[in-house]
Image (cartoon, rainbow, N blue to C red):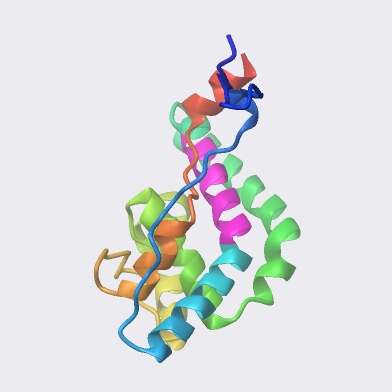
Amino acid sequence: IMMAMVTESGDTLIMEQLDDISITSLRSFKSEADYRKYMKFRRYAAIVYPYAKEAIKIFRETEHITATMKKRKRKKHINKLQEDLKEKFEDPLKKLTKLQGKILIKMIERELDKNMYTLISGLRGKFAAFYWHNASKLYSYDLKEGYQEGKYEILDAVLKDFDVSYRIEQEELKNK
């Protein structure tokens, strides 16, 4: 079943071929500095967006696959996945700036509704979470803080512009 729309001029548009779009009103800012900050955050968010989308996809799939696994098998699967991901993403992620990394983390935390410390603790264990939490403090970031809507207005505005959601059920329906 395909949905079609006929325009006033008689053209037919097939709805399945159109991507979802988001329409928002023009944003107003308190100052020129806030506008420049918004544009900078938006530029950086566009750079990290593919990584955030892929991270959420991998997390959701791993969560789905390992839900029924025993602890030992789950740990082996996650370790193997970590090695594969390290090969693929280590170099590009090392090139990110501190602010780009923070935006990436906030995108992930916003979508998964958990702080990064909890995510790492659940996948890699409490010791790894403790290690990365302390390492993040060197870069003036607290992994336990999590995403709090309303705390950073400009960052909130930028994150609303980017949809990084991924649902396994939707993908499985498309494949059938």
Identified at 45% across, 26% down, the residue is 68
Q: Is residue 40 above or below residue 7?
A: below
47 or 28: which is nearer to us? 28
Q: Position of residue 49 (x, y in %)?
A: 57, 59
**Going by the image, does 15 lie left or right of 161?**
right
Residue 4 covered by magenta stretch? no
Residue 59 covered by magenta stretch? yes
66 or 174: which is nearer to us? 174
Q: Is residue 56 above or below residue 100?
A: above
112 or 131: which is nearer to us? 112
The N terminus, quarter of image: top right
Q: How many marks?
A: 0
Which residue lies most toward the front here? 9
Question: In this orientation, does residue 121 appear?
Answer: no
Identified at 63% across, 76% down, the residue is 96
Q: Position of residue 28 (x, y in %)?
A: 34, 74
Q: Quadrant of residue 85?
A: bottom right
Q: Is residue 9 above or below residue 41?
A: above
Q: How would you classify the magenta stretch by its main secondary structure? A: helix
Identified at 55% across, 56% down, the residue is 52
Identified at 61% across, 33% down, the residue is 18
Q: Position of residue 81 (x, y in %)?
A: 64, 47
Which residue lies most toward the top here? 1
Q: Position of residue 137 (x, y in %)?
A: 40, 83
The C terminus, quarter of image: top right
Q: Which residues are magenta?
A: 49-63
Q: Quadrant of residue 143?
A: bottom left
Question: In this orientation, does residue 88 appear?
Answer: yes
